[in-house]
Image: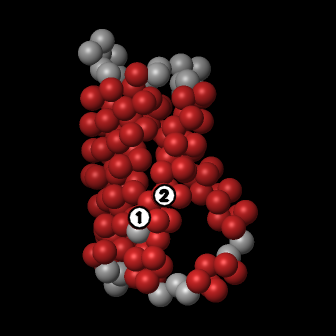
Amino acid sequence: MDFSTINFLAVIVVTIISFAFGSIWYGPLFGKKWQKELGFTDEYIREGNMAKIFGSSFVLIFLMNFGLAFIFTFVERPEFGMIEGAMYGGFIGLFFIGTSTGVNMLYQRQSFSLWAIDSFYQIIYLTISGSILAIWK
């Protein structure tokens, strides 16, 4: 596997954007609803090892964005740009992340709301990442 054509700066930038988007998504937008769906109290949230949680999340988001950039190395069409990148990212988010999260949540007997919060965060950030990675190859 040849990773030399991957723009690592672009992957790092979209990872930071994805992580920042997550702080808004799971903060003021849907944080309290997400917390309620999981039955988490404010105290329980504060007890978490935030360095481990945020650090590990950042690495995993980086790996997902790296994977998206790697997939884009196989696309050799001159018209592949921002729109196509967004479509690839969105489709991967919807058809792989959204569906696999849905299967897990069915067996865990979690709510549709929790599935929507968790899945659409990733669908949206992969769409954004795809659009940026496609034009910043």
Q: Residue furthest front?
A: 28
C-alpha gap between disc 2 and disc 1:
6 Å
Choose the circle earlier in sequence order: 2 or 1.
Answer: 2
Q: Quadrant of the rendered structure where residue 98 is?
A: bottom left
Q: Is residue 2 visible?
A: no
Percent position of residue 68, x then y: 44, 37
Q: Residue at x 55, y 24 (%)?
A: 7
Percent position of residue 2, x then y: 55, 23
Percent position of residue 57, x then y: 59, 57
Category of crowding for the residue at label 1, using alpha-carbon neighbours closer than 10 angstroms: few (below 14), some (14–19), many (at least 20): few
Q: Residue at x 31, y 75 (%)?
A: 113
Regarding mark 2 in the picture, which secondary structure is present there?
Answer: helix
What type is the residue that disc 2 sits on?
A: Ile
Q: Residue at x 26, y 15 (%)?
A: 79
How many discs mark residues in the rendered view? 2
Split into 4 quadrants, where in the image is the N terminus?
top right
